[in-house]
Amino acid sequence: MGEIIGEILFKYVIAGIWIGLNSIYDWIKGVIFGIPKIEVEKKRLEKKWLYKKVILREKLENGIEIGTNGTVMEIIDKKTAFTEFYNQNGEFIEIGNELMYKVKLSKLRLKK
């Protein structure tokens, strides 16, 4: 019984307080510095992903295989990006006259 109460307390009360404090922080940052949260999130994603070498985690619908190397060329939103992929010879993979493909960031892994 104590586990259930602890889980409910942590999930809803403490997480709710944390989300509330984060939203107040974002609101203050927007009012004082004039930076909207969406712009801050996009800049953070661009710093992490943009023009970085990636490896595909899952096979895409257009037939590009797992483990294919590529480069993130543009961040669309916080979940998707346009990515170019390369074959074994280092040439661009072109399917249907397209060189960049819309890929979810969860399907990509940064190359070390």
Image (cartoon, helix red, strand yellow):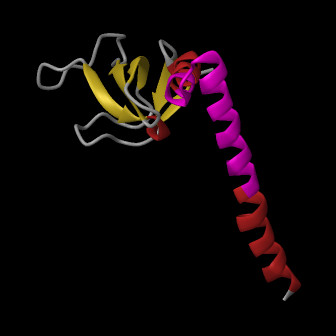
Q: Nearer the viewer, residue 54 or 29?
A: 29
Number of residue marks:
0
Q: Is residue 81 above or below residue 6?
A: above
- Image quarter where the N terminus lies is bottom right
Give coordinates of residue 65: x percent, y percent.
35, 36
Vertical placement of residue 90 versus 10, above or below: above
Q: Which residues are magenta?
A: 17-41
Secondary structure, magenta segment, majority class: helix
State the residue lying farthest toward the bottom.
Answer: 1
Left or right? Give the position of 85 relative to 109: left
**Vertical order, 27 against 53 (above or below):** below
Front residue of this view, candidates 6 and 28: 28
Residue 100, position as x, y percentages in the image: 27, 20
Question: Can you give x and y, in whole percent of width and height, for residue 29 in the image?
Answer: 66, 25
Residue that lies at the very extreme toward the front in this rendered image: 31
- Residue 87 within the magenta-colored segment of the rendering: no
Q: Is residue 28 magenta?
A: yes
Quick one: 51 or 18, which is closer to the camera?
A: 18
Rendering coords of residue 43 (x, y %): 54, 19
Residue in the image at 56% along x and 26% along y: 110
68 is higher (above) or lower (below) than 18: above
Residue at 18 percent of width and 20 percent of height: 98
Residue at (63% x, 20% y) in the render: 112
Identity of the residue furthest to the right in this view: 2
| Residue beneath the point at 84% across and 74% down | 6
